[in-house]
Amino acid sequence: MTRKTIKYIAFYSTDIGDSQNRAAVLSATNKINYICSALRKNGYDVEIISPSWTNNNTGVYRGETKEVTEGVTLKTFATFGSKNKFMKFFKYLFSNLQLYIYLLKNTKRDEPIIVYHSVFLSFPIRVVKLLKKFNLILEVEEIYKDVQSASSFMEKSEFKLFEIADKFIFPTELLNEKINLGEKPFSIIYGTYQVEDERECKFDDNQTHVVYAGTFEPSKGSTLAIAVAEYLPENYHMHLIGFGTDEQVNNIKNKIELVSKKTKAYISYNGLLQGEEYIRFLQKCDIGLSPQVPNAGYNETSFPSKILSYLANGLSVVSVRIKSIEKSAVDEVIFYYDKPDPKEVASRIVSIDLNRKQSGKELIKKLDREFVVQIKQLLEI
């Protein structure tokens, strides 16, 4: 089979937190890797083009082209460290300028290009699209203003990018309904559909282990997870694993210490885990907790990636009831609670019969097969 090559523009790094410290988010990188694997199954090689700049205060770093995995390469550009606002602005401009020049030189008319939506990419992508007439497949994970405050200029720039897209990739059906008013071709992918093999590594202590995995940003539910532990029986253990600022991590540790004095259950902070260490820890546990804040704006259109991680590793999943999950294909295997009340959440956790066979893994495998077909159809339209 003759392989084609497709460009994939995104803030991406293979070594998040290395010496170059280029701007990238682990959850986004994991999803990009998965989509690349689906493209490979359809006969495409992938060139990831990343305008990611360094987050360091000092240093000058060259751009390079390197292999990520077989059939997937990464192109980065030169960048430099900066301390003050003026130099940071120039750094962003310098990265966008290099991306703009590269695309002008290397893009053909009607060529399909996947772009991972970012407000920082809106202007260069819109200009190159106007000049080169390429086929824009826009991967939209969220609406920027739903996540954080944005200026009217940024908001208008974001929606102009939505308007010129030829096709879309969305994380939820609701986001398609909100953005894709012209009913353009689209595909839905909630997150990474990578089912993990059994590691056979369960805790052997006759306890039921519940895990919260994710950000320690307070609005995302980590504080509720700690509060829930106060109302769990003595044969339950609540684990928190994840990431945050130093202040957020210290806050988590302090809250855990306070709750541990009041509960009969166990509660522990188990650090930031990645890769095989993360997978093995999840598989040691029995129940995954996804306590999003129910009235947050982003809940209408985003999908909690931790739910897929839990299901892919064989866990039962307890989640707040929100539309983006209820309207998804995983709705049937989720144990919902309705109010962010620690007692109610604890009661829902305790109600789960762990002897009942879970179907989450089979559902993720089905979603994987379907997405490989969907992305092929989207590219061929």
Image (cartoon, rainbow, N blue to C red):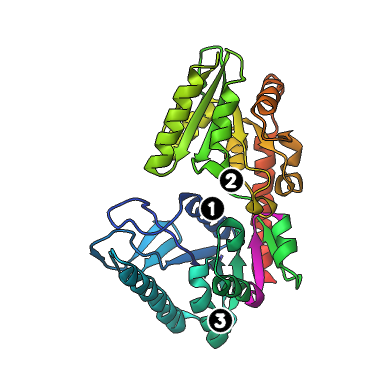
Q: Residue at x 66, y 70 (%)?
A: 167
Mark before the other along the chain sequence, 1 or 2? 1
Mark before the other along the chain sequence, 3 or 2? 3
Label 3: which residue?
129
Badge 1 local density, few (<14 within 10 Å), some, or many (20+)?
Answer: some
Q: Are marks 1 and 2 in contact (CB under 8 Å)?
A: yes
Q: CA distance from mark 1 to mark 2?
A: 9 Å
Q: Is residue 215 above or below residue 184?
A: above
The front one of 189 and 11 is 11
Q: Is 170 part of what is drawn in magenta? A: yes
Q: CA distance from mark 3 to mark 2?
A: 31 Å
Q: Residue at x 33, y 62 (%)?
A: 54
Q: Name the amino acid type tagged 1.
A: Lys
Q: Is residue 263 left or right of residue 360?
A: left
Q: Name the amino acid type tagged 2.
A: Ser
Q: Quadrant of residue 277?
A: top left
At mark 3, the secondary structure is helix
Label 1: which residue?
31
Query: In this picture, which residue range is highlighted in magenta?
Result: 162-172
Q: Is residue 162 left or right of residue 121?
A: right
x and y percentages locating residue 269 in the rendered image: 44, 28
